[in-house]
Amino acid sequence: MNNIAVIGTGYVGLVTGTCLSEFGFDVTCIDNDEKKIEKLKQGEIPIFEQGLASMVKENYQNGRLHFVSEYKEAIQNAEVIFIAVGTPPKEDGSADLNYVLDVVQCIAKYMNEYKIIVNKSTVPVGTAKRVRQLLKEELRKAGKIAILILFLIRSSCGKDRRYLILCTRIES
Ligand SMILES: NC(=O)c1ccc[n+]([C@@H]2O[C@H](COP(=O)([O-])OP(=O)(O)OC[C@H]3O[C@@H](n4cnc5c(N)ncnc54)[C@H](O)[C@@H]3O)[C@@H](O)[C@H]2O)c1
């Protein structure tokens, strides 16, 4: 396992992607904000995190960290896909999952083989099942058959923080 895609290049995605590239993985950070992607390519880091700027620069220059705004190639090449888009609070205080669900549709569109999908966005309990259902529907519409395995793991960061891992095998 070597190729990783991180979707959403904000605080969480940029730090996650950069650290994974520092470990030696080939990481593509995807963001639909084209200006942000261009700035990152120029070495302009939109956030402050100690040591991050030099890590981004070094890994970008040595070719282990890439920044793109197009999904297709990054999704198809990745063995593991991290979702790290925003889930801002709605008026009623619940998390707006639209960005996460948009990303799931894009993943389904370009998915070509077995992928592990990890959701790092903060989401309410039950989102993993919702994501799995959406992925299944989108893949079915695209004529792809998938076996979706869902793991919910309680992380050590706190009782409300959960990671979703969806293992998907595309059979045709
Ligand atoms: N910031 C933190 O310390 C922190 C900690 C833990 C969890 N989280 C959670 O992680 C998630 C991300 O937080 P953040 O602070 O990094 O958010 P952020 O707003 O800084 O970054 C989100 C990025 O996702 C991009 N994006 C939105 N829709 C997209 C799409 N369809 N395709 C590609 N890119 C898209 C945006 O352009 C933006 O750059 C949230 O759910 C947040 O609650 C954040």
Image: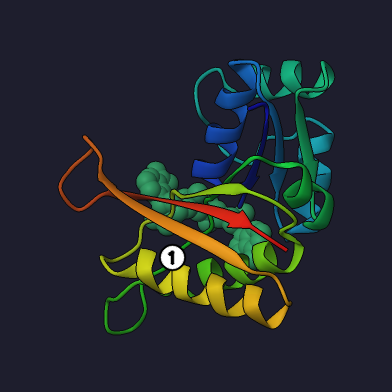
User: Going 29% across and 76% down the picture, which residue do you hit?
Assistant: 94
Residue 25 is left or right of residue 159, and the answer is right
Quadrant placement of the C terminus: bottom right
Q: How many marks?
A: 1
Quadrant where the N terminus sits is top right
Residue of label 1 = 87
Q: Position of residue 85 (x, y in %)?
A: 54, 57
Question: CB at mark 1 closer than 8 A to ligand 1?
Answer: yes
Residue 141 is situated, as x and y percent measured from the top left of the image, at 68, 83
Please state the horizontal and vertical placement of residue 69, each as a whole percent of the image: 79, 54
Query: In the image, what residue type sits under mark 1?
Result: Thr
Q: Quadrant of residue 58?
A: top right
Q: Position of residue 150 (x, y in %)?
A: 38, 56
Image height of 137 relative to 128, above or below: below
Asked whether the viewer can see residue 89, the reply is yes
Q: Nearer the viewer, residue 12 or 108?
A: 108
